[in-house]
Structure formats: C-alpha cells, structure tokens
Amino acid sequence: MKFYNREKETALLENIAKRSLETAQMTFVVGRRRVGKTALLNKVFSAENALYFFVEKKNEALLCEEFQEEIRQKLGAAVFGLSRFKDVFSLLMDLSQKQHFTLIIDEFQEFGNINSAIYSEMQNVWDSKKNASKINLVLCGSVYSLMTKIFQGSKEPLFGRATAQLKLKIFDIQTLKEILHDYYPSYTNEDLLAFYLFTGGVAKYVELLAGAKAFTKKKILHEIFSENSFFLNEGKNVLIDEFGKDYGNYFSILSLIASSRTSRSEMESMMQTSLGGHLDRLETEYNLIKKLRPFGAKEGSRSNKYAIEDNFLNFWFRFIYKYRSAVEIGRFDYVRDIVERDYETYSGLVLEKYFRQQFVESKQFIYIGSYWDRKSENEIDIIAIRDDNKAVAVEVKRQKKNYNAENFALKIEHLKTKVLRGYDVEQICLSLEDM
C-alpha cells in the first residue's frame, strides 16, 4: 500500500533532523497503536545512519545485545559487552559528538517495565552530554497515558527535556476518500460510511482491509468476523497495556458507552458503583472518551454525555466485546446478524460523527457541538458557530426523505430562546448523499 498523507508530520521531522546537525534534539512521538508511527519514522529516517531500537518486554542485557549489533551495523563502531542501557546510551551520546545520526527508540514506555531507573539514567546522560552532541533522538510510544506521563509529568526525570513533540492522528476524511478512489473507484457513499465506521482512519486497519479488497459493508464484516481475524482481539491488544489489572472496569464502562448508555448516572446505575475517577482517567489520561456538553451548558452540567473517540474501538465494544461469548465459540454468523440488524441505527450515529469531523476539518467554525435539553429532548445533531454571529444547525439523516423541516424548525426556535439569542441560524439537513 502506498504512503498516504503525513506531509506536515514528515516536514516537521525533517526540520528537526536538520536542527540536530547543530545541536542535540529529543522528540517524543505518540499516537494510538496501529496509527502508523513506525511506518512514518522508517520512511522519514531511512538513511543508513538511522538506528532503530525496538523495546521488547525482555531482559535489559538481552536488549542491549541487540542494540549493540544495530550500532555495529549502522555506525561501524566496535561495541561489545554492555549490559545496561545507560552505558549504551552514554556511548551513543559520545559517538554523536563526532558523527551525526538519528536514534529511534520505539515502544519507549516499555523501559518502565524492564528497569524503571532507565529514565533517570537517561536524564543524567542527556543533561551532561547534550550540549556537545549532534544526535537526533526520537522516542516513540503507543501507550498514550505512559508516554504523556514520562514527558509531561512534572515529577518525572525526562520532564522538560524534549525539544519537540508529535502526536500522530488518524487519517482525515479526504485521505480516506483518496484511498477508496485509488483502490475501489466505484465506491458509493454507503461504502465510504462503512469504511469510515470500521477503520476510523487508523492506518493499520485501512491497510488490512485494502489488502483484502474489503471496501463494502458485506466484505468488511466477512473480514472482521472470520476465523483467526486480526480484528477480534484487537480491543484487548490495544488497551490492556493501558489499563493494567483494572482493565475489567474500564472495559465495562466502554461497553456501556458504546451501547448508548452515555450518561454517568446510567453507567453507575448499571454497575452499582461510583465511576467519577474512572471516567476522568478515560478522558484525561487515556484520551479514549470525550465528555460532551449540550451547547450553552456550563462545565458542571448534569446533562453531560460521554462518547468513545475511536470509531473502531466503539464498534469493537458495541459488537465484539459485548457478544464475546459467541465470538469465542466461533458463532461469527450470529454476531454478523446482530450487526446487520442494528446497522442502520448504529451507522446513523456514525454519520453524525462523520459530518461533525467534516465541519472540524473545514476550519470555518469557532465551535462545533450538539444540543439537547435537560430532558434529552429538542436534540440538534450539529451546531456550528462562525465568528460573525452566524450559526448552522444540522439534522443528520441517512435518507433525506426522512427529514421533517417543520419539526426541525421548531427545535431551532426553542434553541434560539435558550442559548442562541441574536444569532442568524441556517437550517440544513445532511444525509448520505452529502458525504
């Protein structure tokens, strides 16, 4: 599969590499698993003098043996017998005083499981040798909470040491369209919605489905719900390292949100326990959910709802984790039938998110959100505010024939009396045909 998008990220990394010719640079790169971090770094830093260290969960001495082999091959340095990473890193900082190179350390957060002292040891080496060094140090990780803590936690040894950071995001809508056009030129908007719904723009999922020529709902479902499918255990593979031993509670919360139990009170009623701390961590530490407030509501509003940010994980918790007993015994036909049964309603909610994302990517608005009153009535799917007292109120329907303009106008009048006084509000309907 050809390399898509990432022009801005490539330019940033290339610029940092140029700066490292004069003075040492430390960049941390973070993003959810499968988003394409390693592929991007390998593309940008493909020269022979780019070292690549992958931190596996193994003994420190064994890792250092592998790292030394990479150093011998790429830099031609005669290095043997180092069993502590601090000594390997110190040697590289010394070498970089005479020879410029890039060092990529992938899954950097795993050092914490191998030897937690490595971070403070790296800090001491970096602080003492960076002024004379010309190293381009790129530290990459996929456990968002740990990577953020390592570099942004004020009590952590590497706090304040990074000279740049890059958060790699999912493919945008235009890139997904470009990929479909290249691989399946006859795609329909229904196909585009399915591709967006199942991949969420995550590079690995896009690559897998493109490789299987699965671009329609039917073919994608066959690819997901089949023996030895990559996708069936993907939620666990992505998240268990994030959550650790407490993953059961977090998985239960995410499953409830994915099944439209989106208010804190609903979730606490179902789980019979207080969830404030878990919800806060899912939002602020793990970056997995987003707290949604109706337009005009204050910070502490009781009308808040929660949503899973990641399209694939939302699908995984809604259909795979929820029906895991059937999945585990191979009843893929049973779960596929459930997806088919619920697909129109479920994809309608994803279509709302699609247009919300499209509005964000247009960069024409200063606020994009939704509205509902205290009784969860008078709902407006999308409200987008411009900076000239003009607003767009959107009702999203899979089929435009189901749109009732008069009813929607009444909702907008209600909104004007509450929080949009003095605004010029444009009323529109968006459907599959507008994608």
Image (cartoon, helix red, strand yellow):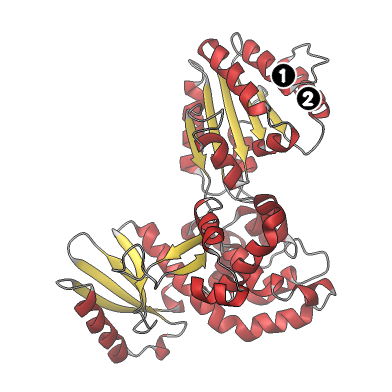
Indicate the quadrant where residue 121 lies: top right
Q: Is residue 413 left or right of residue 10?
A: left
In the rendered structure, which amino acid carries the disc numbered 1?
A: Val
Residue 420 falls left or right of residue 342: left
In the image, what residue type sits under mark 2? Cys
Spot occupied by residue 79 in the image (x, y as percentages of width and height) = 78, 13
Q: Residue, x 64% and y 42% (percent of image)?
A: 39
For mark 2, does the 10 Å Cα neighbourhood hold few (<14), some (14 to 19), or many (20 or more) residues? many
Direction from residue 15 to residue 30 in the image, left or right: right
As rendered, which of 184 and 56 lies closer to the eye? Answer: 56
For residue 88, which numbered disc appears in the image?
Answer: 1
Badge 1 vs badge 2, beta-carbon distance below 8 Å: yes
Q: Position of residue 125 (x, y in %)?
A: 61, 17
Q: Kindly indicate the quadrant of the structure image that contains residue 128.
A: top right
Camera-side residue of 46 and 228: 228
Image spot of residue 71 (x, y percent): 74, 20
Q: Which residue is painted at 55% across and 28% down in the image?
A: 158
Residue 20 vs residue 418, the one in the foreground? 418
The residue beneath circle 2 is 64
Which mark is first along the chain, 2 or 1?
Answer: 2
Q: Residue at x 50, y 67 (%)?
A: 307
Residue 253 vs 28, above or below: the answer is below
Residue 263 at least partly seen: no
Secondary structure at badge 2 equals helix
